[in-house]
Amino acid sequence: MTDVTGAPADVLHTLFHSDQGGHEQVVLCQDRASGLKAVIAIHSTALGPALGGTRFYPYATEAEAVADALNLARGMSYKNAMAGLDHGGGKAVIIGDPERDKTEELLLAYGRMVASLGGRYVTACDVGTYVADMDVVARECRWTTGRSPENGGAGDSSVLTAFGVYQGMRASAQHLWGDPSLRGRKVGIAGVGKVGHHLVRHLRDEGAEVVVTDVRADAVQRILEQYPQGVTAVADTDALIRVEGLDIYAPCALGGALNDDTVPVLAAQVVCGAANNQLAHPGVEKDLADRGILYAPDYVVNAGGVIQVADELHGFDFDRCKAKAAKIFDTTLAIFARAKEDGIPPAAAADRIAEQRMADARAAR
């Protein structure tokens, strides 16, 4: 079913009527010469210009791309609010296979689209886009971050993303076991790409036992060669979540990892990972709580990267960023405390805190 514009009716209902909507602006972008098809979604500018990455992905349908942009943009509003940033939430998706369709012409065209918004949206890297891509986009758009140091940027934001997730794990251990140390804990990581391989390093440095999996065999092999001791691999995520004695599960790939199929069989006592939108649908957070599994909200613990790219806009300082990302430990503990006080799951507690900050900002205008 479509509406008069030809857009799927369920997408427009999400935008205008559902709890997942409430977005300020959604822009559909097309440049026939380069083949660009993109969606830019701005969820909120209550705290400042919307900030969020650009995902380059071969969506099965345009409707799927729009829905992903809406969900990701909304998540960025909450992430930026909880990270204490003066930025609202936005996200962009480019429809296509980045290995096949990404060209300099397409990225330049995309940069012009972002620039046309006049600073309401600041873009950065996400799945399928890299520092080198942001360097190209920045040639047409000054509202671009996540660039290379050679071009005035901060470089790879996955370094601090992993550091923040590690802090979230330490906070989870403190809350659940009374000690932030991860030494001797068994941690399963699904996805050892941009962020996951840095997370392995933090965990091994502390003496944790790590189990990994990834859809790319070469990514797993790289980890096993780098860490011949203390790291093992399993065939897939289905096997990982069932690993005996697993203490922490870290979804570090795409979203939807926590769903009606995975939660009932999850062996871990804690979920804390870098992936965005880990909860497949509303209610999963309660299912986790009912099973006694502590969930560290994804948009809280994976905020290290956005802290870094936001700092780049003001003259990047790594030590300043790392100090701010280290506070994810305290923020995560505060969320667990609020959840216990209010008798709600941690995901709901984080939402309440973020929503209050955004509401306060709107009221102060």
Image: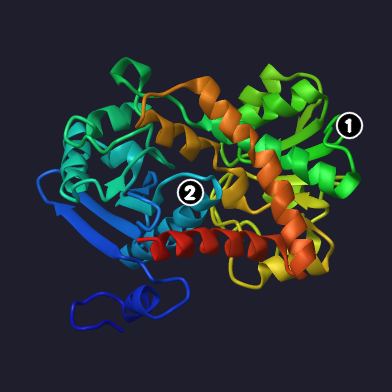
Q: State left or right for residue 267 relative to residue 102.
A: right
Which one is in front, 145 or 352?
352
10 Å crowding of disc 2: few (<14), some (14-19), many (20+): many
* Residue for point 70% across, 55% down: 335
* Residue for point 33% across, 51% down: 92
Q: State left or right for residue 332 relative to residue 209.
A: left
Which one is in front, 279 or 122?
122
In the image, residue 136 lies at what x, y percent? 24, 29
Look at label 1 and name its amino acid. Answer: Gly
Q: Earlier in the sequence, mark 1 or mark 2?
A: 2
Q: Which residue is mark 2?
A: 80
- Res 184 label: 1
- Res 318 label: none
- The answer to whether the residues at label 1 and label 2 have Cβ atoms under 8 Å apart is no
Residue 236 visible, this angle: no
In the image, residue 81 lies at what x, y percent? 50, 52
